[in-house]
Amino acid sequence: MSSIDPLPVSSLEKAPASFEDEREDPTGPATIAATLETIRETGSVVDQNLAQLRDWIAKHPHIHRCRTDARFLLRFLRTKKHSFLAASQTLERYLAARALHPSWFQQLDIRSPDLAHLADIGFLYALKERDANGCLVSLCDWGLIDPKRFTLDQSNRMHALMIEAYGDDSLVQCAGAIAIFDMKHVQLAHHSIISLSTLRLLARYINNAVPVRCRAIHAVNVPAGALWIINGLVNFLDEKIRNRFNLFRDYDELAQKFDRSLLPKEYGGKEPRSEHMRVFREHCERYRDRLLALDEMEIDLEHDESYSRQAMLDDIEGGAVGSFRKLELD
């Protein structure tokens, strides 16, 4: 661990004397030009939007401490295709979510006992290589989480760790991410740590507060008894994300829509699972200081705006859960 050089921590001054403008233009995939056109990143739009978002943060009555460096702010601008209004709303909700749910979004430390354990058993990791479009691909063997030891909090925190660890990557910001969930090891005991109300709350933050371009969600090896979990979460996702959800019987069927060579060797890919896990662990270690510094960001939630404490928590426990877009196994 000591041989991995940590990255510098960015300033949290909401109106610093000078801004950190260090950033990289995404390169690599043959499709990158089309991707940049899709997210409307052309000409001087980046500099204009960064200046506007920084001015907005400086004048924001409720944001007290926040990163203003280009790498951080471009996460929100690129996710929302350089719409200032949508990016600023997502940033408000992102800061609010971190404050409201510290057990999900704070202390994202790969050395903490819970997260270190989940990393060691291969609960979640990013694959070593990107897909042809440059998308980051993550693989989560969700059933590996011990329901006697953990709750959904640790699962969500592990996912937050991965999202933040790759959040400053320009290619991830532009090309987006693909999530694969292997449900093979899900057992009846796992149902005790999940409820529709928690799935609804999780989906609300995925929809409104996570600055990532979700390109696809694939569920593989889903036992019949776990279908309600998949149905529950998918039902609460925005239609745009819901339409990018796919259900597969096994990895052979997944290979019809996904480049299998990217997967660990155990699932038909090239390199062993342990190698993917090692690279992911080292990446999280390198970004550790930067991730822990995020906990010092601050937003006041005691008001009546749409990102207030009450507004962010309203209508989670009550109300109808909606009608499922029912997914079934043949």
Image (spheres, helix red, strand yellow):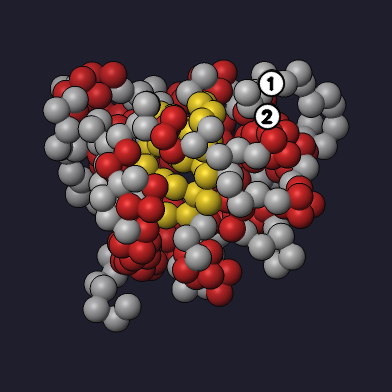
Q: Which residue matches tag 1?
A: 326
In the image, residue 222 lies at what x, y percent? 60, 38
Q: Which residue is drawn at 63% across and 26% down?
A: 329
N-terminal of the pair, mark 1 or mark 2, is 2
* Quarter of the image with the C terminus in it: top right
Mark 2 residue crowding within 10 angstroms, few (<14) / some (14–19) / many (20+): some
Q: Disc 1 marks which amino acid?
A: Lys
* Residue closer to the observer: 314 or 114: 114
Task: Name the mark on residue 168.
Answer: none
- Disc 1, disc 2: CB below 8 Å? yes
Residue 162 x %, y %: 44, 53
Which residue is drawn at the image coordinates 28% and 19% (left, top)? 38
Q: Is residue 296 above or below residue 2?
A: above
Q: Tell which of 137 and 56 is nearer to you.
A: 137
Q: Which sits in the foreground, 70 or 292?
A: 292
Q: Name the residue under label 2.
A: 231
Q: Can residue 207 be seen in this view?
A: yes
Q: Specify the quadrant of the image occupied by residue 2.
A: bottom left
Task: Residue 159: give x, y in percent of width and height.
Answer: 51, 51
Q: In this view, does 198 lie to the left or right of 33?
A: right
Q: Is residue 125 left or right of residue 225?
A: left
**Above-or-below relation of 210 to 69:** above
Image location of residue 156, percent across then percent down = 59, 51
Label 1 residue SS? loop
Mark 1–mark 2 Cα distance, whole angstroms, equals 6 Å
- Name the quarter where the N terminus is drawn: bottom left
Residue toward you, 248 or 297:
248
The amino acid beneath tag 2 is Asn
Tag 2's secondary structure?
helix
Q: In this view, does 62 lie to the left or right of 169?
A: right
Q: How crowded is mark 1: few (under 14 residues within 10 Å), some or many (20 or more)?
A: few
Q: Can residue 109 be seen in this view?
A: no
